Image: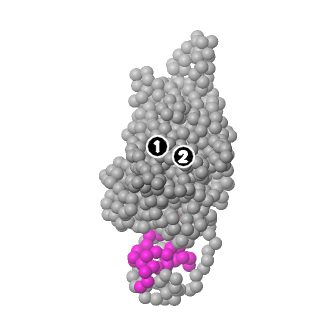
Amino acid sequence: MTSNRAFTSPRLRRLFCSLFIVAAAVAALGAFGSSDPSGLGSSPERTTAATKIAPWVMEHTANGQQAEFFVVLADQADLGGAAALPTKNEKGRYVRDVLWNKSQTTQGPLLQWLGERGIEHQSFYIVNAILVKGSREIAEMLATRSDVTRVEGNPHIQNSLPQPVPATEGSSQPGAPATIEPGIVYTHAPNVWALGFNGQNIVVGSADTGVRWTHNALKPHYRGWNGVTADHNYNWHDSVHSGGIVCGPDSPQPCDDDNHGSATTGIAIGDDGGANQIGMAPGAKWIACRNMDKGAGTPARYIECMEFFLAPYPVGGNPSQGDTTLAPDITINSWACPTPEGCSVNTLQGAVEAQAAAGIMMVVAAGNSGSRCANLTDPPSFYAASYTVGALNTGTDSVAFFSSRGPVTVDGSGRMKPDIAAPGTNTRSASNSSDNAYTIASGTSMATPHVAGAMALLWSAIPSLQNQIDPSRAALNNAAVHIASTKCGSAGSPNNVLGWGRVDILSAVTSGTPTPTATPTATPTPTPGPITLSARGKKVGGINTSRLTWSGAISNNVDVNRNGIVIAAVPNTGIYVDSTGTTGQASFAYNVCEAGTQTCSNTVTVNFGP
């Protein structure tokens, strides 16, 4: 089996060919002319094979060309058993073992077939697939196999990354920034710090152009730095194996070839201990995987980084050495795999879902396609398992003009996206140009790490939620400042423009835990009062969601009770949307009370079907 880090050695293939040129030629002719299922097959077999092959592969293997493509096996792992496991370590170990064992028991015949023919290939396990470099004939031969479900392209795509402008360094310079950046303040992160929670014990993974790890605002927070020496093993991986415009291929230490990765990491956790408090969760640690070369990515690079985050391994090592106990809790994903450039709709889906099953919160940028509806079309932004972030004009509750919107049509789901929104304009963060340089940029790339950092704060404040994906998303959604919109098929909040609204991490931390595994604290029997409550339920992205409306409350704030437990303390606006974090059949009893009292509304029960 070849290494997962790179294709089979070209030098070894040349030696093989020079020693066995005649035999190889005869074998190749026999294979290409064979009617066996491992060859091109009969006309019906060709027709069946063609339905499995993505259009991009057909186009890029025309006229004798060779291209890289994924051979996706039909037998994919079932990760359903991870949901019942209570801890991150248990979830991660289970998911990695199930995926690894599936790949080991099913890929053997394909790997042997490829190896015998000297065909370049790379094995993956986070999705049961093999990356192959070959011709149209090779793609067709593989597609005829019963153990292959589809053949999808590995296009080189160019992310249109936000273009930063230089920013001042610190308070000693004219026009210096405020100590805490405006976007951080607007999400109320400093109020959570004041409660004693700044992201401690949480690890954030950066999937991006890399990170300048020596930057003053980043180095103190790098998990590979102990204050004296650096150890990049299990903390850094480079999925760029050729080229490498600035960093070169397979960089042995964190390196950023663009600015983008340093900036997004800084917004999540950056702080130089002085006047540059650029990050949401400065008490968290970061690790990183470079999945783009100056913004150029491929599905293979993206998947390789997701595989590394699932079970990190040493620099220069391979996935067989993966250690799930060193996986990050949250990953920042301000990149895309555009379908118009050849990325298939579901190539990345299995890898994204595997991270979620392992308890890793994958926070994803909605994209910067503008104000047209249904333009949220690039994987992984529209997957249900992605926690997708739209952008606000910083300091306001208005959507940034560039922020992509739902509903999701590219996969036929009609899914509501984005999920939530955060400040995304004129955002100041770390630069890769020097250890004390800063830049300013705008984009959903900047909004995304605000939410990743918010999740780190939530998990440091409420450990019972840590690595519990659905309840944690519900906690941020419920506590968000709901911003109504009737655009893009929406009606109120949540909607296809800003999802559940602006992230408010203070409200999420202080509103109680919406997790069903928390120990409930019963409230006294409510005293009937003048508040009148009504409620209705619907499925939003598959999640049981209740919309509560009330009148008659006279206090500035009200307590929302679900099944006898206070789940939120919110302004008395007369409306609250509860994303319960549950799916399937369920029943919830609600009432609303004057804040801090037992003067409450009638009780209304909302029932959900399967």
Reply above or below: 382 against 114: below
Mark 1, secondary structure of its residue:
loop
Residue found 41% across the figure and 25% down from its top: 62
Residue 350 visible from this viewpoint: no
Say how the picture is coloured. one colour
Q: Residue at x 38, y 66 (%)?
A: 483
Instruction: Single out the mark in the foreground, 1 or 2.
Output: 2
Q: Nearer the viewer, residue 99 or 105?
A: 99
Spot occupied by residue 60 in the image (x, y as percentages of width and height): 42, 28
Q: Residues within 10 Å of mark 2 (few under 14, many from 20)?
A: many
**Residue at 56% over, 38% down:** 238
Task: Compare residues 79 and 241 and report the one nearer the observer.
Answer: 241
Amino acid type at circle 1 is Asn
**Residues in magenta, as a range:** 554-582
- Picture coordinates of residue 248 (x, y %)? 53, 32
Residue at image mark 2: 215
Q: Main secondary structure of the magenta part?
A: strand
Task: Determine the CA span between mark 1 and mark 2.
Answer: 12 Å
Side of 296 where 90 appears, left or right: right
The residue identified by callout 1 is: 259
- Relative to residue 325, is residue 513 depicted above or below? below
